[in-house]
Image: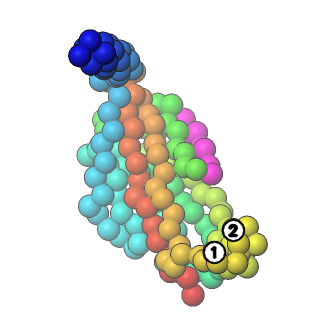
């Protein structure tokens, strides 16, 4: 019985430390607002009703193609947004400041691997997904010193 009581005390101490660690890292000024409900030409809009992030790419492509990806960020606020940075797993881009009503665009190319590339990298049983999926990009920006984060839509590219 004494061992069970000692274990219970240890569990309570660990739980208290865990809650304290969580609360010490919690930042109520950082918010993530996501809304993926608008669809136009194989892209959806993620927005917080004021800043909009859109990911665009082709509707279809071939394995082994280099395709153009476009990031668009629009500021619909009545004040500038600053230190605007877009990033995904492969790309980081600093948009700097975006003024009210302004849209800034970043464009780059990515390679859609061929089935041969996939098998060479991951083994003979590996396959390529069709449609080819590109996850959304993240946007971090500041308004009057407060940090905000949004995530764009993702896209699916049909392989032909």
Q: Which quadrant of the structure image shows residue 140?
A: top left
Foreground of the two, 149 or 98: 149
- How many labels were placed on the picture? 2
User: As drawn, is 49 to the left or to the right of 115?
Assistant: left
> Which residue corresponds to the image point at 49% horizontal and 77% vertical from the top-left?
131
Q: How is the image coloured?
A: rainbow
Q: Residue at 58% of width from left, 50% of height from top?
A: 89
**Does 111 sit above or below residue 74?**
below
Please provide percent x and percent y for residue 14. 35, 18
Q: Nearer the viewer, residue 20 or 86?
A: 20
**Is residue 43 left or right of 59 when viewed as pictured?**
left
The local crowd at label 2, few if under 14, some if 14 to 19, many if 20 or more residues have their Cα within 10 Å, is few
x, y percent for residue 30: 35, 28
Could you tell me which quadrant the C terminus lies in? Answer: bottom right
Picture quadrant of residue 141: top left
**In this picture, residue 113 sits left or right of residue 35:** right
Q: Are marks 2 and 1 in contact (CB under 8 Å)?
A: yes
Whether residue 143 is situated above or below residue 113 in the rendered picture: above
**Residues rendered magenta in the picture:** 90-97
Mark 2 lies on a secondary structure that is: helix
Quarter of the figure with the N terminus = top left
In the rendered structure, find residue 126 and report the number of the disc placed on it: 1
Spatial CA span between label 2 and label 1: 6 Å
Farthest-out residue, bottom: 160
The numbered dot on residue 117 is none
> Front-most of 60 and 17?
17
Q: In x, y percent, where is residue 103?
A: 45, 49
Picture layout, residue 157 above or below residue 77? below
Query: Which residue in the protein does label 2 denote?
Result: 122
């Amino acid at each position: 019985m004494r061992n069970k009581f000692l274990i219970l005390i240890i569990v309570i101490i660990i739980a208290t430390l865990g809650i304290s660690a969580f609360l010490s890292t919690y930042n109520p000024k950082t918010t993530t607002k996501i809304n993926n409900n608008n669809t136009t030409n194989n892209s959806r809009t993620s927005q917080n009703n004021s800043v909009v992030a859109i990911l665009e790419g082709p509707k279809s492509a071939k394995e082994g193609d280099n395709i153009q990806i476009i990031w668009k960020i629009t500021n619909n606020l009545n004040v500038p947004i600053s230190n605007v940075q877009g990033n995904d797993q492969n790309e980081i881009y600093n948009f700097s400041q975006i003024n009210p009503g302004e849209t800034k665009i970043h464009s780059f190319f990515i390679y859609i691997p061929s089935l041969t590339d996939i098998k060479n990298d991951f083994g003979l049983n590996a396959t390529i997904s069709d449609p080819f999926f590109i996850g959304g990009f993240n946007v971090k920006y500041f308004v009057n010193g407060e940090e905000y984060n949004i995530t764009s839509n993702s896209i699916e590219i049909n392989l032909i």
